[in-house]
Image (spheres, rainbow, N blue to C red):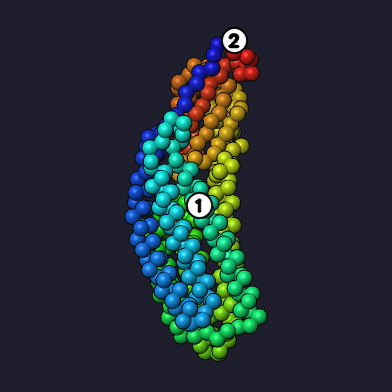
């Protein structure tokens, strides 16, 4: 019985890794700037929230603290992912970014719990709030978050880790809008209860963002197929290639954001056919943007379960 013709790799493995690396260096500079902005204004919000007696502002500061932690974690993960790995870690440390995204989601959930508990206490007995001070500090927080969102606007589309940091800032920006609204209503009408009410709405928004990020991070760690790829469509496209008789043991997963992988066994009429292998790999690269591929060509009579003697 003839053996299977096996070839692994990708159409442009080094190119795809270089793309990930180049994206990482550009994103690192932006994240450092964002971290400095967030850390500075977080302190201002803590002081302003304490002086104004505002839960909405303190909640926004708590969320900004989670932003600082999230961005710091993202920077560490991006640095760690670039470190040289030993022979036992064949994919390097790329998954560090996914772990950071998961940790960011957990931090968001902790922030939500804090906001809800404090809002419940203040709704039962609303304390006085300095509306003008609340408004002024919240406006500054909104400006800082808008600058951060602008800096990270491109990276969020290519990195789940950066998307986590971007989501932190987006929810924080909306939280600042809520705090501004609470400040206006407290200052204009004396509605102190609006402060904790707005805080609950901020918390619900944060919860929504955290849940989506949590699901995506877990999906990558569980090696589920990327959401943008239909595995049945991939199988059909491979079967449509002339000379392919069967496709089995097909797996598609994400190594890290922007780097999807595929492995498959392909039964073909001519198993020692580099041209067929090249056509399949090019098709997967162009049609599905799968850069890292491992494909094993097998003859029709090949029994992979036969014991090796």
- Label 1 environment density (alpha carbons within 10 Å; few <14, some 14–19, many ≥20): many
Number of the label disc, if any, that sits on residue 101: 1
At x 60% / y 65%, what residue is drawn?
113
The answer to whether 27 appears left or right of 222 in the picture is left
Residue 176 visible (yes or no) = yes
Q: Is residue 33 above or below residue 6?
A: below
Q: Which residue is mark 2?
A: 309
Picture quadrant of residue 38: bottom left
Picture coordinates of residue 145 (x, y %)? 42, 67
- Label 2 environment density (alpha carbons within 10 Å; few <14, some 14–19, many ≥20): few
Q: Which structural element holds mark 2? A: loop
Q: Which structural element holds mark 1? A: helix
Q: Is residue 45 above or below residue 164?
A: below
Separation of disc 1 and disc 2 at Cα? 46 Å
Residue 269 visible (yes or no) = no
Picture coordinates of residue 178 (x, y %)? 52, 75
Q: Is residue 170 above or below residue 259?
A: below
Considering every residue shown, the one lying at the far bottom of the view is: 189
Picture coordinates of residue 216 (x, y %)? 56, 50
At x 58% / y 46%, what residue is drawn?
219
Camera-nearest residue between 298 and 203: 203
Camera-nearest residue between 38 and 234: 38
Quadrant (top left, top right, bottom left, bottom right) of the N terminus: top right
At x 50% / y 29%, what residue is drawn?
294
| Disc 1 and disc 2 in contact, CB within 8 angstroms | no
Considering every residue shown, the one lying at the far right of the view is: 124
Task: Identify the mark nearer the N-term, 1 or 2.
Answer: 1
Camera-nearest residue between 106 and 251: 106
The answer to whether 295 appears left or right of 144 in the picture is right
Q: Is residue 52 above or below residue 142?
A: below
């Amino acid at each position: 019985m003839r053996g299977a013709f096996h070839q692994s790799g990708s159409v442009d493995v080094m190119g795809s890794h270089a793309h990930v690396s180049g994206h990482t260096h550009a994103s690192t500079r932006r994240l450092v700037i964002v971290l400095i902005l967030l850390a500075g204004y977080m302190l201002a919000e803590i002081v302003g929230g304490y002086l104004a007696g505002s839960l909405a502002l303190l909640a926004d500061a708590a969320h900004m603290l989670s932003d600082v932690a999230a961005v710091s974690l993202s920077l560490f993960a991006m640095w760690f992912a670039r470190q040289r790995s030993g022979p036992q870690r064949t994919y390097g440390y790329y998954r560090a970014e996914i772990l950071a995204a998961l940790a960011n989601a957990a931090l968001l959930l902790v922030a939500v719990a804090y906001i809800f508990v404090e809002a419940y206490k203040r709704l039962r007995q609303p304390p006085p709030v300095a509306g003008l001070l609340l408004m002024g500090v919240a406006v500054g927080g909104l400006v800082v978050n808008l600058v951060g969102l602008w800096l990270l606007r491109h990276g969020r589309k290519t990195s789940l880790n950066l998307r986590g940091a971007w989501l932190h800032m987006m929810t924080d920006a909306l939280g600042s809008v809520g705090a501004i609204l609470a400040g206006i209503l407290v200052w204009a009408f004396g509605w102190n209860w609006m402060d904790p009410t707005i805080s609950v709405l901020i918390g619900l928004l944060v919860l929504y963002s955290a849940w989506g990020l949590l699901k995506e991070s877990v999906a990558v760690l569980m090696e589920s197929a990327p959401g943008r790829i239909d595995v049945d469509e991939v199988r059909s496209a491979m079967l449509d290639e002339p000379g392919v008789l069967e496709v089995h043991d097909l797996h598609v997963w994400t190594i890290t954001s922007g780097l999807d992988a595929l492995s498959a066994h392909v039964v073909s009429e001519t198993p020692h056919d580099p041209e067929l292998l090249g056509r399949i790999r090019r098709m997967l690269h162009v049609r599905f943007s799968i850069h890292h591929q491992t494909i094993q060509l097998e003859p029709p009579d090949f029994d992979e379960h036969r014991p090796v003697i």
